[in-house]
Image (tube, grey):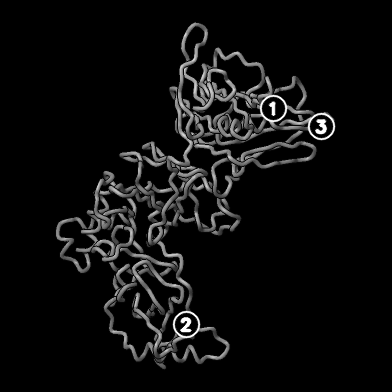
């Protein structure tokens, strides 16, 4: 049991609510524990987001901790839970949202604060905060955000419940023998919900094409903002805190802070599956780790490719494609295609076939061009578990995107709407930009070129499923062995089949 759970237990224990400042912790803990046991389906914005957050450096008038409640979207009139949400733009102090509207109750004399502002403005060679420069230390608006015995943090300029406006900054004031003195100031544009010690914020964003609103298991991308030596965050993530309301779904995610010295080499943006009570539908998805919560792009019907399924296999097809029954070997077989052509002519279509009985004329992943009666056709097939996805269209890019989307249930949704070129030595290949997942590319995906070992040439190996989002395959091209690590078998096959290399 961690420190948070220990504190919760003590606060909820017999007599704990009579202890100083325990009532707020107990009340907040009950809300959070209820939220951790089940996902809420509520309408009020004040209960919109669940986040287990207990910042350790939150200063009140008496130097004690403010209670931390659940983050919520901003409202014109702040409800109690929203007002109490603790936010911060620096690592060592946080304050309630209500403080950004009217400040916290405090005993700090305005004359002392003004004197510190005036001396800061007059100090030679120092750029004072913009509001102090433009309005003067004796007139610039300010609010008190946090107070301790050691330091007072004020917000200068115009602030709202959403945070600072363009001219606003935070200023740290320290008590000296000559009164308050400004010892530091900074912008505060990136507000986030405060986290307990040892936890780091994780950004939640959409994959390429947006989040699927039709499933209860949508995929998002997650990214650690702190320096972590480029580690894969998935082994260090906490359980996503998800709250569903009538108008939105709010996700808060954190990770175990990196222990020890870390390099800032850039962190991978990796897929993560959320589990909802209901599909998103028309609701908005939010990253509730920020303040205010940040909308995450959701794919909508007018721009959305549609998901089709066959048993455990999945694929994405263009908007407007529909299902028809085509005669096959004396029976009917479902085939998808555009409404303005006959999919059963197989000039523009997509269909699943049993992998064990599929009669292939080429290697999986090869996309070839053919022409008949002046009509161009780009066609190919890939594997998705036990199934084959076969597809064709007059547009090579459309065929590639369809095939690259083939996957089994639970694998990342690849949107290969753009392709990039890669090369090593005399070997060249093409792969989906950012591997079709959007955001920063996962550094574990890639193509490795090595010398072909002796023995029989391997045209295309069987796939090695490393985990739900990583598949490895290899093949021999010219004098090289090409090894591809990709989000799915389909993508690995497409990349491997695109390789061109000299024969040596």
- Would you say 472 lies left or right of 176 here? right
Labels 3 & 2 near each other (Cβ < 8 A):
no
Residue 172 locus on image (x, y percent):
43, 79
Residue drawn at (58%, 88%) of the image: 125
Does the rendering let one see residue 44? yes
Element marked by disc 1: strand
Task: Answer left or right for 435 relative to 409.
Answer: right
Q: Which x, y percent locates residue 326?
A: 49, 15
Q: Nearer the viewer, residue 78 or 93?
A: 78
Q: Which residue carries the number 2 mark?
A: 183
**Judging from the image, what secondary structure is the residue with disc 3 in?**
loop
User: Badge 2: how crowded within 10 Å, few (<14), some, or many (20+)?
Assistant: few
Q: Residue at x 38, y 49 (%)?
A: 285
Residue at the disc numbered 1: 475
In which quarter of the view is residue 108 placed? Answer: bottom left
Q: Which residue is mark 3?
A: 502
The answer for how far apart the CA atoms under marks 1 and 2 are is: 62 Å
Q: Residue at x 48, y 36 (%)?
A: 305
Residue found at x 47% / y 9%: 331
Task: Determine whether, in the image, residue 246 is placed left or right of residue 216.
Answer: left
Observer-nearest of 17 and 117: 117
* In the image: residue 344, left or right of residue 12: right
Tell me the quadrant of the picture where the C terminus can be found: top right
> Does residue 138 sit above or below 323 in this rendering?
below
Name the spot of residue 381 as percent of width and height, x first: 60, 24
Tell me the mark number nearer the camera, choosing from 3 and 2: 3
Specify which label sits upstream in the sequence, 1 or 2: 2
Q: Nearer the viewer, residue 338 or 61?
A: 338
Q: What number is the disc on residue 344? A: none
């Amino acid at each position: 049991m961690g420190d948070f759970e220990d504190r919760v237990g003590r606060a909820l224990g017999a007599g704990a609510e009579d202890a100083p400042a325990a009532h707020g912790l107990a009340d907040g803990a009950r809300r959070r524990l209820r939220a951790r046991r089940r996902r809420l389906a509520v309408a009020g914005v004040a209960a919109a987001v669940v986040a287990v957050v207990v910042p350790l450096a939150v200063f009140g008038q008496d130097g004690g901790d403010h209670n931390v409640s659940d983050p919520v979207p901003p409202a014109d009139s702040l409800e109690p839970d929203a007002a109490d949400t603790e936010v911060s733009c620096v690592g060592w102090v946080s304050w309630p949202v209500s403080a950004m509207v009217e400040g916290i109750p405090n005993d700090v004399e305005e004359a002392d604060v003004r004197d510190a502002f005036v001396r800061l403005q007059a100090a030679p060679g120092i750029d004072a905060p913009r509001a102090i420069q433009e309005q003067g230390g004796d007139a610039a608006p300010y609010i008190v955000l946090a107070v301790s015995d050691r330091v007072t943090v004020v917000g200068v300029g115009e602030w709202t419940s959403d945070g600072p406006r363009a001219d606003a900054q935070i200023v740290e004031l320290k008590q000296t023998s000559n009164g308050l003195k400004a010892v530091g100031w900074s912008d505060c544009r990136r507000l986030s919900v405060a986290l307990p010690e040892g936890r780091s914020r994780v950004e939640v964003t959409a994959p390429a094409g947006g989040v699927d609103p039709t499933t209860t298991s949508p995929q998002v991308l997650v990214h650690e903002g702190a320096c972590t030596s480029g580690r894969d965050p998935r082994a260090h993530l906490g359980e996503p805190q998800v709250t569903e309301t009538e108008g939105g779904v709010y996700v808060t995610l954190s990770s175990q802070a990196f222990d020890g010295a870390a390099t800032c080499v850039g962190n991978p943006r990796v897929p993560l599956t959320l589990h909802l009570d209901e599909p998103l539908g028309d609701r908005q998805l939010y990253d509730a780790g920020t303040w205010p919560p940040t909308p995450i792009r959701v794919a909508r019907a007018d721009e959305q490719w549609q998901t089709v399924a066959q048993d455990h296999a999945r694929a994405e097809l263009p908007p407007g494609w529909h299902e028809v029954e085509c005669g096959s070997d004396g029976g009917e077989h479902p085939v998808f295609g555009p409404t303005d052509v006959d999919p059963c002519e197989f000039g523009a279509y997509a269909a699943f076939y049993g992998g064990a009985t599929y009669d292939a004329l080429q290697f999986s992943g090869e996309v070839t061009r053919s022409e008949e009666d002046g009509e161009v056709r780009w066609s190919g097939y890939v594997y998705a578990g036990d199934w084959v996805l076969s597809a064709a269209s007059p547009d090579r890019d459309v065929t590639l995107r369809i095939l690259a989307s083939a996957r089994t249930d639970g694998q990342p949704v690849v949107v290969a709407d753009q392709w990039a070129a890669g090369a090593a030595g005399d070997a060249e290949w093409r792969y989906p930009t950012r591997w079709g997942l959007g955001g920063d590319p996962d550094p574990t995906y890639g193509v490795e070129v090595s010398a072909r070992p002796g023995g029989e040439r391997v045209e295309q190996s069987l796939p090695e499923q490393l985990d739900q989002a990583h598949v490895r395959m290899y093949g021999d091209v010219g004098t090289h062995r090409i090894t591809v690590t990709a989000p799915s078998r389909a993508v690995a096959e497409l990349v491997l089949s695109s390789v061109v290399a000299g024969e040596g």
